[in-house]
């Protein structure tokens, strides 16, 4: 027998409202996306909350919920309950069998699920979702709660396996709790080419990189406990599952960031290898300059992604803390309302099966992300140190080349100055005396060499000899200047 009374299926949906650095246009788009999860006739009932921060706001105002009924067989009834939780929009869509006196087979969950999916128009949440199935055992002394829970789970998610997804269970005061979860990252490993093509659009948050379902099943022993507990827990789950969804979403984002950081880290190692392989003796400074240009392109993206990874770690830490506090608050609330008093003390409700999620986040997700942050941070420090060293090398070479250029200018300037001075007094040279004949000039050592040049007129002997004297003076002074500068640079310092 798998019959249940008061059979109900609740769906908790969460959409991103805004994030740091998000524009007003993007926030408006998120609002429109969230509204699509409600019937068109109800969207005008939504009251958008203009507050910068709001921990909890009911978006239907004082009306709180909007109920609905169906003419199905058996008839269904339920309600919409939209809220804002700070930077998140949440929606509770509850659907149950209207007849709360008659028992129905646990597999009736399938029809409730179909009703809910139809009302959502195939809209998917950007952050995540959770299901809660609950009902009263029709024959608590004769039924197997686990077998009924299995039927409920397979009716909701036919493709999932109970043994694989079961996270925890507990039974207290004859109320049976089961938690099941399937979560995995579906991020594909891009090639380097694909990474470069999509680099510009990678900053946007995307919930499509993960998939899975989260289900809590509660089987109550009596009608009284079922009605009272459902009233209390329906809205407590809203906050608890919100923290859970944000944790998993942030972890999914960290996997995307890790992929980009890993790709950039490979490029960084290539740059570092180029720097190590640069032969400074051959003055391969152009290659170093190209390496620096490449690192300047990588460094901003790498730094931003590393900062975003740290933001995701902080988000998980905050929401994990809130999740654990909420679990304890729910346990205290159930203890106060349902635990019998014995010797003026109440037996506390044990919800430690919900704490296992927190343990997994702390011992696996956060540990892994912190190790990755440390690794990528060390890579960034190495890159920055290498850039500083390379820049120093390039600057030294640039200074050396500037100094050589200045010395060259000084040498040439002194030579030209000396040559010009010699030219200004060339009229006083002995060979410039008009009394000296052409025959005598041809006997001059310089004149004898010049005279051998074919086709050179004899009249050119006198100015050519004077020009050679001027050039000689210029080269002599230039040489002396070069020697003086060399000795100056070699002086002890």
Image: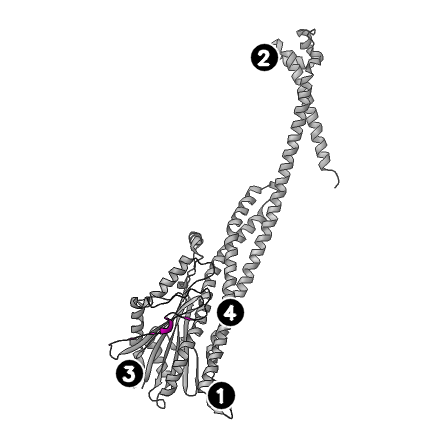
Q: How is the image coloured?
A: one colour
The residue tagged 4 is: 318
The residue tagged 1 is: 347
Would you place residue 293 above or below residue 302 in this image?
Answer: above
- Report whether residue 273 is seen: yes
Image disc number at residue 99: 3
Instruction: Identify the secondary structure beneath mark 3.
Output: loop
Rendered image quadrant of residue 459: top right
Pick whichever of labels 2 and 3 is earlier in the sequence: 3
Q: CA distance from mark 2 to mark 4?
A: 96 Å
Instruction: Identify the secondary structure beneath mark 2.
Output: loop
Q: Is residue 96 magenta?
A: no
Pick whichever of labels 4 and 1 is earlier in the sequence: 4
406 and 460: which one is in front?
406
- Report whether residue 166 is seen: no
Residue 195 position in % (x across, y down)? 44, 54
Instruction: Identify the secondary structure beneath mark 4.
Output: helix
Q: CA distance from mark 4 to mark 1?
A: 30 Å
The residue tagged 2 is: 454
Outermost residue, right side: 492
Q: Which residues are magenta?
A: 55-72
Marks 4/3 in contact by CB < 8 Å: the verdict is no
Residue 109 position in % (x across, y down)? 31, 78
How crowded pointer 1 is (Cα within 10 Å; few <14, some 14-19, many 20+) is rated as some
In what quadrant of the picture does the C terminus appear?
top right
């Amino acid at each position: 027998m798998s019959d249940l009374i008061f059979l109900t299926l609740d769906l908790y949906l969460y959409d991103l409202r805004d994030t740091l650095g998000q524009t007003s246009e993007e926030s408006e788009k998120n609002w429109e996306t969230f509204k699509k999860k409600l019937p068109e006739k109800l969207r005008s009932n939504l009251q958008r909350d203009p507050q910068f921060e709001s921990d909890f706001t009911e978006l239907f105002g004082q009306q709180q919920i909007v109920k609905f009924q169906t003419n199905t067989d058996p008839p269904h009834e339920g309600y919409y309950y939209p809220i804002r939780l700070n930077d998140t929009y949440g929606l509770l869509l509850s659907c149950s069998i209207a007849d709360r006196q008659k028992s129905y087979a646990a597999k009736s969950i399938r029809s409730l699920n179909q009703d809910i999916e139809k009302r959502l128009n195939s809209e998917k949440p950007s952050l995540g979702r959770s299901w809660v199935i609950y009902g009263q055992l029709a024959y608590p002394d004769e039924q197997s709660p686990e077998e009924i829970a299995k039927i409920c789970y397979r009716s909701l998610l036919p493709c999932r396996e109970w043994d694989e997804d079961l996270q925890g269970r507990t039974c207290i005061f004859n109320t049976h709790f089961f938690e099941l979860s399937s979560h995995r990252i579906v991020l594909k490993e891009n090639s380097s080419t694909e990474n470069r093509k999509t680099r510009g659009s990678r900053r946007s948050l995307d919930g499509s990189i993960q998939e899975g379902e989260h289900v809590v099943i509660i089987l109550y022993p009596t009608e009284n406990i079922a009605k009272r507990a459902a009233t209390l827990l329906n809205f407590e789950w809203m906050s608890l599952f919100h923290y859970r969804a944000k944790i998993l979403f942030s972890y999914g984002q960290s996997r995307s960031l890790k992929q980009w950081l890993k790709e950039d880290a490979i490029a960084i190692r290539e740059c570092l290898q180029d720097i190590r392989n640069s032969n400074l003796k051959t003055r391969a400074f152009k290659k170093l300059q190209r390496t620096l240009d490449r690192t300047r392109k990588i460094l901003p993206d790498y730094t931003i992604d590393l900062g975003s990874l740290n933001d995701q770690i902080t988000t998980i830490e905050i929401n994990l803390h809130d999740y654990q506090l909420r679990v304890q608050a729910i346990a205290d609330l159930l203890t106060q309302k349902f635990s019998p008093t014995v010797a003026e003390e109440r037996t506390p409700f044990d919800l430690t099966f919900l704490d296992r999620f927190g343990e997994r986040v702390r011992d696996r997700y956060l540990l892994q992300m912190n190790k990755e942050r440390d690794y990528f941070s060390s890579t960034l420090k190495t890159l920055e140190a290498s850039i500083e060293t390379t820049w120093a090398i390039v600057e030294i070479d640039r200074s050396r080349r500037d100094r050589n250029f200045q010395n060259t200018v000084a040498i040439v300037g002194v030579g030209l100055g000396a040559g010009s001075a010699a030219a200004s007094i060339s009229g006083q040279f002995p060979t410039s005396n008009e009394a000296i004949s052409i025959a005598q000039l041809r006997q001059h050592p310089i004149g004898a060499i010049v005279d051998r040049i074919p086709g050179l007129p004899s009249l050119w002997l006198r100015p050519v000899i004077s020009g050679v004297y001027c050039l000689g003076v210029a080269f002599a002074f230039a040489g002396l200047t070069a020697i003086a500068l060399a000795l100056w640079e070699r002086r002890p310092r």
